[in-house]
């Protein structure tokens, strides 16, 4: 099963443009609530992830401040390893 990775937008880019760039790379994206890793209310989160540019434009036209989630695994052909320290804090 795929999980989601939060991706920062490329510099000097709107979130829509960033989402379209990620889709062009073959990554299936979906909208997240602004400033969070939580899927937009009423959505199916990672299950809605797509590379379809019409759907992506629709989502970010309606929700221009939505963060970008990226489906990992088979949906996007990438694997993500999230490594946390013992206490979940950055080591110094």
Image (cartoon, rainbow, N blue to C red):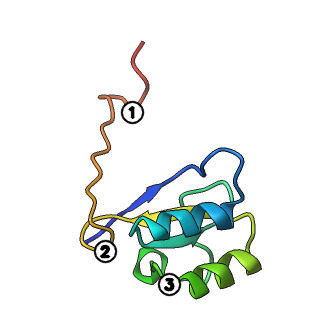
89 up-or-down from 5: above or below: above
* Residue indicated by mark 1: 88
Question: x, y percentage for residue 57?
Answer: 66, 80
Which structural element holds mark 3? loop
Disc 2 residue crowd, few under 14, some 14–19, many 20+, Cα 10 Å: many
* Residue indicated by mark 2: 75
In the picture, the quarter occupied by the N terminus is bottom left
Write the residue at 54% across / 63% down.
21
Image position of 55 (left or right of 16): left
Q: Quadrant of residue 26?
A: bottom left
Q: Which of marks 3 and 2 is nearer the N terminus?
A: 3
Q: Nearer the viewer, residue 56 or 71?
A: 56
Question: x, y percentage for residue 24?
Answer: 47, 69
Q: Earlier in the sequence, mark 3 or mark 1?
A: 3
Cβ atoms under marks 3 and 2 closer than 8 Å: no
Write the residue at 33% across / 64% down.
72
Image position of 66 (left or right of 89): right
Write the residue at 29% across / 69% down.
2
* Residue indicated by mark 3: 52
Question: x, y percentage for residue 37?
Answer: 54, 58
């Amino acid at each position: 099963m795929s999980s989601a990775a939060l991706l920062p937008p490329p510099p000097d880019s709107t979130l829509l443009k960033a989402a379209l760039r990620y889709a062009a790379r073959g990554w299936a994206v979906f909208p997240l609530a602004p400033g969070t890793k939580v899927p937009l209310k009423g959505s199916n989160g990672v299950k809605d992830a797509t590379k379809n540019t019409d759907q992506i434009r629709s989502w970010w036209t309606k929700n221009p401040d939505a963060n970008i989630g990226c489906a990992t695994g088979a949906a996007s052909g990438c694997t993500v390893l999230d490594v946390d320290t013992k206490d979940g804090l950055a080591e110094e």
